[in-house]
Amino acid sequence: MISPTLSRSLVALALWPALSQAEVLGIPKQDGFSGFVSAGAAYNQLDSNTLVGSDKDASRRINSWNDMASTDGTDLSLNFDLRYTFADARTQIYLGNLIHDALRLDFSQQLGVRRQFGDQGIGSIAYVFSGFSTELWQDPYRTGSDRSTTDRSSKGIRLGWDGIAGSGFDASYTFRNIALDEERSGQSVSDLSAAQRASLDRNGSSQSLDLGYNWALGRGQLLRPALTYSVKDADGDAMDYTRLTGQLTHSLRTPQYSLISNLFAGTLRYDQANPVFDRKADANEYGVNVNFFWHRLAGVAQLSGILSATYGKSDSDIDFFDSELSQVSAGVLYSF
């Protein structure tokens, strides 16, 4: 399931309300470090037969493929974004876990460089890697006994361009290799052939293309429609898919607070039928996300409080792959 995403540029606008859009999207005019560090806690409820939730023991066993594993609990998070600017060269080096990735449950980190090319925009290239692995079930189809977990990690490259040709458009392309420590999908299903089990292999690679437009509405408001097209090329043919997602983000910023809201909807289409169910696991996905920033927390200029609420749902043609996430979180963010 995809959770709502949040453009980094809009987060920056929320954190630095005194700056204009051009100043935030551009590279600083002075040498030195900048960025943020944030910490918080989230309560979430997850219904999913493939993802491991906060309380893995609560969803470790399902008795049939008609069951839905459900778990809830509290997670702690620590995110950071560290940057160093070479002002004369219009170049910036960055490392960290961007907020918009964290909101879509993608905890990969980036090590990259951005450079401004006059009025043509800012190009970037980054190494993308998993700072913390995501937990999945080794064999999500196992019923009647406890399932074992495995870690999924990824690494790859991301190319981006902000302010294309001086416009409000931005685009990025990401390629990742995806690896599971232990992939045993379908091994518990006795009537599958070796070839059918191999077709369930979730290792492989993914590619995604993002295109968005930042539309300033005046009075501290910005609207950003965006489209994301992604392709998964898995080692197992039944795990290959394409996904198309549309998102609409609205940002309202004032000197005291900022409010960022996201709506998204998407479709997920598999290339082949899943041999366990003898049909494709195509899905429709949608969700909403709201983030409230309270600036100058406790009278500290660089400190912001954050409240966030997220709801996302994936409705698959195979009920086993339905998933639903509800999450509320609170935290603090220090910018510098």
Image (cartoon, rainbow, N blue to C red):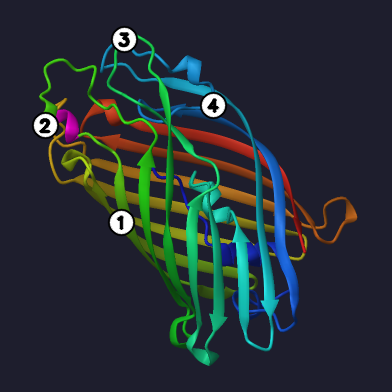
Q: Is residue 317 left or right of residue 22?
A: left
- Circle 3 residue: 63
The magenta stretch is 195-199
Task: Out of 190 and 172, give the one closest to the viewer.
Answer: 190
Distance CA(mark 2)–CA(mark 4): 33 Å
Q: Nearer the viewer, mark 2 or mark 4?
A: 2
Kind of residue indicated by mark 4: Ser
Kind of residue indicated by mark 3: Asn
Q: Position of residue 111 (x, y in %)?
A: 56, 62
Question: Of label 4 and label 3, which has the lower sequence position?
Answer: 4
Q: Is residue 18 above or below residue 239?
A: below
Distance CA(mark 3)–CA(mark 2): 25 Å
What predominant SS class does the magenta segment belong to? helix
- Circle 4 residue: 54
Q: Residue at x 26, y 40 (%)?
A: 283
Q: Position of residue 332 (x, y in %)?
A: 74, 47
Q: Is residue 313 above or below residue 115?
A: above
Q: Position of residue 248 (x, y in %)?
A: 44, 59
Instruction: Write down the quadrant of residue 83 in the picture.
Output: bottom right
**Which element is circle 1 on?**
strand
Q: Position of residue 193 (x, y in %)?
A: 10, 24
Q: Where's the N terminus, which quadrant?
A: top left
Task: Out of 194 and 13, give the one closest to the viewer.
Answer: 194
